[in-house]
Image (cartoon, rainbow, N blue to C red):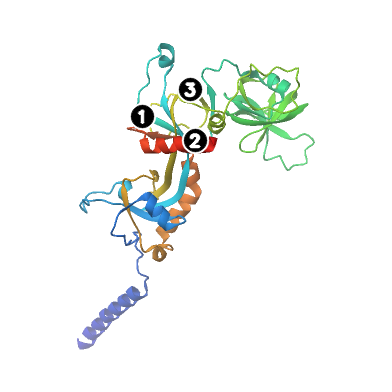
Amino acid sequence: MQHVLGGTIYKQTRKIMESNNEKEQSPPEVSKEIQFTWTETPQPLKEIIDSSGDLPSVVKMWQEKPSSDSSPLLDIHKPLLLYKELNGVKVYCKNVTSVDLLTGAQCKDDPIVVIPLGYAGWFRLIDDRDKPLTTISNVARIMPKKILSYKQVTGYIRDQYTTNSNLAEPLHLKVDIQPGLLKVLNVKEDFVRYTDHKKIVKRKLLRCLVCKTEDDTNVLLPFEVAGMFYLIEVRKSTSKHINIENIGYAYNIKDMYTAGLSKGVILKLLHGRPPSKPCGFSQILKVCDLIKDHTVIACTISENKRLLELPVAPVPLFVKALNYPHFDRHQTFLDTLKFMDKNADGYANELKVRHNYKVDKTARKEEKESKKDEKQ
């Protein structure tokens, strides 16, 4: 009996020792939350950025009355990675409907669509009576450098599976070419082997305009293809006998601003991403202001990352993280930094939506003074 009891105690003791050894050998859990140490005195963003030198930096909005621990933090109250400072002009617009244009009704003040000069979209002036080209043959007659295809058209692209083959005639695919920017290369007249939507191989003599899409794909557009094609850039060698004065152009916002874009002008977005936030976007926009904005692109340091564009203004106030060198290798911080490397520039140049639009008189005065200095 004692032998059996002793064996049982030995086994239990052995299990306890093995369990303790496993606990000692297992690595400690790394907290996903970074423990920040904050400055005691809150400051405006401009003072923090000026004192920090080069970004990035980490801040948090100062709360005079901190919320209870049980209430969830808003994104703006979470630790923020200040990544990139922006200082440039933005075009403030109001949505306009077709009814507004016909009746002359005033468009609503809220919300406002903000267009940065780096926005990768294409517009036309609503008062422009010039018409777009309607066939590829008309485009080929002018041979511009770049055009904007406003509608989906049918064309041919090289079959990637036969690109490196030794076929005498490469195989093409008949596909729908989505609206977008096209770089005009040359004219080609030859037999084209292609497969249609039924996977049937055909061969046809085609006269095509060879273009390159925004993703560097060469496309063949037959002369008879119909659509709506706006000129973007023409060649200097365009024949003087070809009249291009009454042909519609598409412009990016930076070129329009350089050419003298002013308040009251109405634009139509032909191609480009709409705002990500709902605002009753109508694609027709009336310019209500051109403002020099000073902002900084930031991101929440959390698992669910959110991008923000913060105004560099006297309010609100922020506190700055003091222990930056100690957490710059923390995985959450590195993930946030990597996320910003990939997404910050795209976010900075997309359409934004603003509410409660008001112009800072001080900023307007500074803008007028800077324009005077430029003229002098």
Image point (38%, 15%), residue name: 105
For marks 1 and 2, give the one nearer the viewer: 2
Q: Of the numbered discs in the image, which one, if any, rests on residue 372?
A: 2
Q: Is residue 202 visible?
A: no
Between discs 1 and 3, the one toward the N terminus: 1
Between discs 1 and 2, the one toward the N terminus: 1
Badge 3 density bin: few <14, some 14–19, many ≥20, Cα 10 Å: some
Report x, y in % for residue 294. 43, 43
Report x, y in % for residue 119. 51, 36
Query: Would residue 253 be found to the left or right of residue 74 on screen?
Result: right
Q: CB under 8 Å between callouts 1 and 3?
A: no
Between discs 3 and 2, the one toward the N terminus: 3
Alpha carbon separation for disc pair 1 and 3? 18 Å
Please name whichever residue, 163 or 363, is drawn nearer the observer in this view of the structure.
363
Image point (64%, 31%), residue name: 182
For marks 3 and 2, give the one nearer the viewer: 2
Image point (43%, 62%), residue name: 328
According to the image, label 3 marks what residue? 265
Query: Would residue 150 be found to the left or right of residue 293 on screen?
Result: right
Secondary structure at badge 2 equals helix
Image quarter hosting the C terminus: top right
Secondary structure at badge 3 equals loop
Residue type at mark 2?
Lys
Please name whichever residue, 59 or 159, is drawn nearer the observer in this view of the structure.
59
Residue type at mark 1?
Pro
Question: Relative to residue 210, is residue 105 depicted above or below?
Answer: above
Badge 2 density bin: few <14, some 14–19, many ≥20, Cα 10 Å: few
Report x, y in % for residue 235. 71, 28
Alpha carbon separation for disc pair 1 and 2? 31 Å
Question: Relative to residue 184, is residue 246 depicted above or below?
Answer: above
Secondary structure at badge 1 equals loop
Question: Relative to residue 284, is residue 367 depicted above or below?
Answer: below
